[in-house]
Structures are given as structure tokens and as C-alpha cells.
Amino acid sequence: MSALSLSLLQRRLPKSSAILTGVRNLMLNRSKRDPNSVSLERAIAILKAYEVGQPKRTVELHVHCVPEKGQLPIRGSCVLPLPIKSEIKLLVFAEDEKADAAEDAGADYVGGEELVNSVREGKVTFDKCLSTPEMLPKVAKIARLLGPKGLMPTINKGTVISGDIAEAVKFAKNSLDFKADKVNIVHTGVAKTGFSVEEIIKNVTAVMYAIRENAQASPKKFVRRVYISSTRGPGVHVADA
């Protein structure tokens, strides 16, 4: 719709008309839309063209968020419809019955103070870490080691488990964790280039839903821009993620 058409509508419709308001909003949204942005399906096709013959390369999602003033850091977890990492090494600091439950649920390393010492000495490597509240004071002794790696269990991250440790282990083994950087942009891998277009779309949708759950006001306004990229491919602005 041209500016002339909008002007004619303004003359014919009353100023309070809901129709005119809708037209104004539509024109405003179109003016803000990047003309170089493409649909998510088209963006995936572009990246796949760059990665022909490379099915194991990572498709990355970059989401620029606009949080409210004073809002807590943007972070979260979600279970991807199709996981991108086949084996996640999970370590759980727990003792007694909770240690048994964590081990039965599939945790790779489970233990108390002796496991704290093993981590301090670099004897175990792992991707994620959980702790019971009872073990947290002992785990705090290696906070300087775990913290820079993003592995220190905290209540805010939901990695200090006071409830069902078995369910927490199962979720951690199959979930993707993400957090925003200092300028409120979430960078995370969401798929492999060998996944089908439909599989990548499902994974992106799951992560976008989890990111928007951080919104304190409008989820739509919370996300400003979305790009996807791959190991060798460009960053592609997505219009409909």
C-alpha cells in the first residue's frame, strides 16, 4: 500500500476507526522490516548450499533480545526435538540415596567430596554439572574452577536440585542450555547441516520459544532480530523465526 493510498483511507475513515489503526500498524511494521531478511526455510536452504558435503557442521542461532530494565540475565534450557550432541557428559554432586538415583537415571559421574577433589585435580571432564543443596558448600571450594566454564551449580540456573534428582538428570542429559552475552544476544548451536529443513525448523522453534519465555512484557517485542549461520556460511537475517 502506497502513502497516497493510506492518505485516501485517512480521508474516508474516521480517526477513531479500528480499520485505520490496523492499516497504520501494518505500514509501520513493513517500514521496520529488513528488506534483506528471508523466511526461516529460505535461510536454511542458503546455509545448506554453503555446506554441501559437510553434514556435521553446526547451524547456529543468534537472537538479539531487548529485555526490560532491571531484568535478570537471559538464560534457559530446552529439549531439542532432534539433539545436536549425541553424548553429554553429566556430573552430579550428591550423596546417599540421591547419588544412587542420579546414577540410575544416567549421570556419568556421581559422588561427594571425593568427586570434588577429582574435579579439582582435573581427573574428570564433563559438559554439565548438577548438585544437591547439601553438597553445595563443598562444591563452592572449586567455584573458581567451575565458574569461568559456566559449570558452577547455582539456584538461579536451576542446577541446584532439591527435588527429583532423577528427573533433573534426564532433562540435563537431553537439553540445550543457552544464555545471552553482555549485549543481550543469545548465540547457540541448534542443529547440524545434515539435518533436514523440517528438523532444523523444529529445533529453531523450540529454542525461540524458550528464549521468549524470558520476556517480562510482550514476547514479540522481546526479540529484535534473529540470524542463523553455519560454520562456513554467512549470517542470514530471518524474518519469521
Image: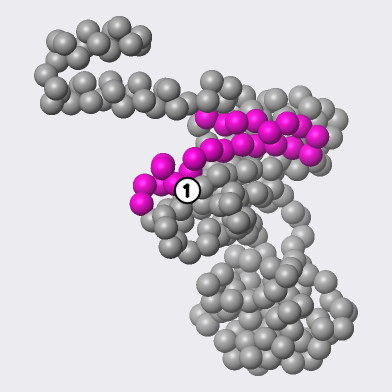
Where, by quadrant of the figure, is residue 111 drawn?
A: bottom right
Where, by quadrant of the figure, is residue 182 drawn?
A: bottom right
x, y (%) of residue 128?
70, 69
Q: Which residue is mark 1?
A: 66
Instruction: State the extent of the magenta-drawn residues as a range.
Output: 217-239
What residue is rendered at 59% in x and 91% in y?
Answer: 134
x, y (%) of residue 204?
59, 42
Judged from the image, the secondary structure of the residue bearing numbered disc 1 is: loop
**Along the horizontal axis of the image, is 32 left or right of 208?**
left
Amino acid marked by disc 1: Val
Quadrant for the N terminus, please.
Answer: top left
Say if the magenta span includes residue 219: yes
Q: Residues within 10 Å of mark 1 (few under 14, many from 20)?
A: some
What residue is rendered at 58% in x and 22% in y?
Answer: 36
What residue is rendered at 62% in x and 43% in y?
Answer: 62
| Residue sitting nearer the eye, 163 or 221 | 221
What residue is rendered at 79% in x and 39% in y?
Answer: 231
**Along the horizontal axis of the image, is 81 left or right of 65?**
right
Say if the magenta span includes residue 179: no
**Is residue 146 among the parts visible in the rendering?**
yes
**Along the horizontal axis of the image, is 95 left or right of 67?**
right
| Residue sitting nearer the eye, 87 or 10 | 10
**Is residue 79 among the parts visible in the rendering?**
no
**Along the horizontal axis of the image, is 22 left or right of 63?**
left
Vertical comparison of 13 with 144: above or below? above
